[in-house]
Amino acid sequence: LTVKPIYIRCGICINCPTSDSSCSNLNKHASICFCKLKESNSNQSLVDVGIKGTGYIDSQEVNQLCAVWCSEAARPFSALVEASHKSILHPTVIKFLPARRAVSTDIQMIYLAIQQNYKAVLNAHQGALYLGVDALQSPNGFDILGAVIYRLVEDNSLDPKLEAMPLATKDFIWLAESHTEEHLARAVTLVVEKFGIQDKICGIVSNNTSNNKLMVNKLKKQKWVRFRGEPQWIRCFAHVLNLIARGILQPFGTQKNSKAAKEKKLLTKTTQMDCVPRVKIWRNMYHSELGDISVAQS
């Protein structure tokens, strides 16, 4: 005689418990589901009844999730409101989607909140630290400096992972002056000493420009324990390849560039010749105020 198993569909979850001989397992399953039902809130989500999906998202966490996404994925703040991006977002996220300025403020708040904690992590790190710096000028004339710290992080896996963490709010430092070697060296020194990692820097990564070379020589004078100056200056390979490509392509645009340079020089000379008589007249009118200022003629 073959005993057929007992099948029953649970009314709370999506499981279908079975039993070959008795209903004790069925009673046990029912008691567990009833306990889960009592502990859950009146407004249940799909996860509470056993259906796996996106789950419940708290509206107060939307700003933090958006800030983390923009930071980790290096996405612009305007990407949040794009129609193609909003079509794949959770309805709760779309409903409470923050504005671009709000995301920028949230990133700054998150960075300031974890800054002291990350400083302690860097101070406890036993391996080498490498500093990546890059200075540039924005189209609206602001000089900014990007500073990123690189280190190997060991986890449960056998292979260590390379971690990159910016050392400034929103990844950039706004320089009050032009990015010369003195100002760059001063800004990098302030950032490194702020986190207390000057004795753990083993190398600096940057592009192969002359001001960076002078900056490295000035940082050598700081006498950091592991940093020896130019021998530990790592040139950005992508920047070197860019210079090589521009050098190869330069002969193909020499004639065009020289023609444009001649036109620019002629225009500048014409403008100067046109301005000299006006300056002479103005100088004669206000000679007593100008003193010995002379006008150079080309």
Image (tube, helix red, strand yellow):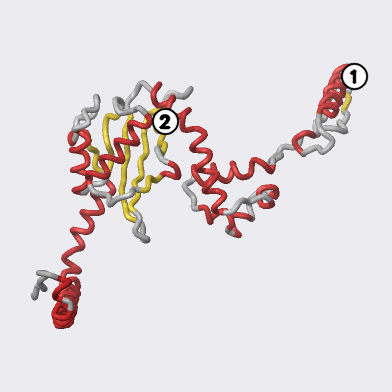
**Quarter containing the N terminus:** top right
Please name the amino acid that badge 1 sits on: Cys
Q: Residue at x 22, y 59 (%)?
A: 246
Viewer-closest of 157 and 22: 157
At label 2, counting other C-alpha atoms closer than 10 Å, the crowd grade (few under 14, some 14-19, many 20 or more) is few
Q: Vertical placement of 92 versus 15: above or below?
A: below
Secondary structure beneath dot 1 equals loop
Residue 170 position within the rendered picture, expressed as x and y whole percent measured from the top left: 45, 45
Q: Amino acid at mark 2?
A: Lys
Q: Work out whether residue 239 or residue 94 is closer to the camera in this orientation and state it.
A: 94
Hey, which quadrant is residue 39 in on the image? top right
- Give me the disc on residue 23: 1
**Residue 10 on image: x %, y %:** 86, 31
Q: Judging from the image, what secondary structure is the residue with disc 2 in?
A: strand
- Where residue 161 appears, as percent x and y from the top left, is 41, 30
| Residue 161 seen by the camera | yes
Q: Position of residue 211 (x, y in %)?
A: 21, 47
Q: Nearer the viewer, residue 66 or 240?
A: 66
Q: Are marks 1 and 2 in contact (CB under 8 Å)?
A: no
- Which mark is drawn over residue 245? none
Real-space CA distance between mark 1 and mark 2, rounded to the nearest whole angstrom: 51 Å
**Mark number for residue 161?**
2
